[in-house]
Amino acid sequence: MSKISVIVPCYNEEKAIPIFYRELMNVLCTLNHDYEILFVNDGSKDRTLDELKVLAEKDGNVKYLSFSRNFGKEAAMLAGMRHSAGDLIAIMDADLQDPPALIPQMIEAIEKEHYDSVATRRVSRKGEPPLRSLFAKMFYKIINKLSDADIVDGARDYRMMTRQMVNSILEINEYHRFSKGIFGWVGYNTKWLEYENIERVAGQTKWSFWKLFKYAVEGIVAFSTVPLRIASLFGIFFSIVAFVMLIFVVVRRLLYGDPVAGWASQVCIILFTGGLQMIFLGIIGEYLSRTYMEVKARPQYFIKEKN
């Protein structure tokens, strides 16, 4: 009999945890599998850890890890995978936007249809601000064109994987992690389950527009060097333009003299090229900063408390 590990990253989810636990148990109790529920408290500032301790006292299958501070969801998922003991590992959020009712379908797809992973994607973004939905769709289009990672539009972190696939993921020791890309990059056969967007059961989203933007940049930089190539191509292009313009200026000087004219267009060109240079220096800086962090080899998280 295979064992299922359910990894649940938590950050300020004290209101959602009791509701999530009841809904998850309604599903797990119907399965003919051993299980463990591994909550990862990502430095919550509310009573999330207290709620987890209460659950752990009542249910021996509930485990928890508590970070020394907030390290982010990526670190929480990594810690959960490292400490999980199951043959099948599921990752899901505590806000019930990831429906536990899909777990039986996931198990069946892996055990009977021989998939290595069963992932989920939202087919709608009902309840999200239109601008946020628009940028999200643009991000998926851009990253799939720029990188080798297979990232499906609307993909969630909610998925179930075999132990073999999880072990492959754990061999990747990057400090800056982008799990949506890693899941696709390691390969393995994946089945996708689709469902309509579900509103949070309690609390507020932790993903502001700025955090999502930084997460998108993280994904592009982690799985593509195309931005660096674009910067190089622009550099070559403007060097050619500058050379042509130099010839034009010399010829005009020899033929027509040197009237004082064109200062406005010259200033515009200087500002435009200067702005592009700053943008491309910023792109290079993003890659250098990540190289810097990788060389430092800091741990992705510290566990302050666990049961």
Image (cartoon, rainbow, N blue to C red):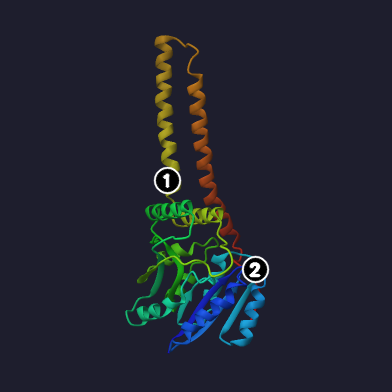
In the displayed orientation, state which residue is furthest to the left.
113
Nearest to viewer (mark 1 / mark 2): 2
Q: Which of the two labelled residues, at mark 1 and mark 2, occupies the earlier sequence position?
A: 2
Label 2, on which residue? 44
Alpha carbon distance from label 1 to label 2: 40 Å
The type of residue carrying mark 2 is Ser
Quarter holding residue 40: bottom right
| Residue 56 position (above or below residue 14) | below
Instruction: Locate residue 94, reporting x and y percent.
Output: 54, 72
Q: Nearer the viewer, residue 88 or 24?
A: 24
Q: Residue under circle 1?
A: 229
Q: Residue at x 61, y 82 (%)?
A: 55
Q: Is residue 83 visible?
A: no
Residue for point 38% across, 75% down: 116
Helix, strand or loop at mark 2 = loop
Q: Position of residue 305 (x, y in %)?
A: 66, 76
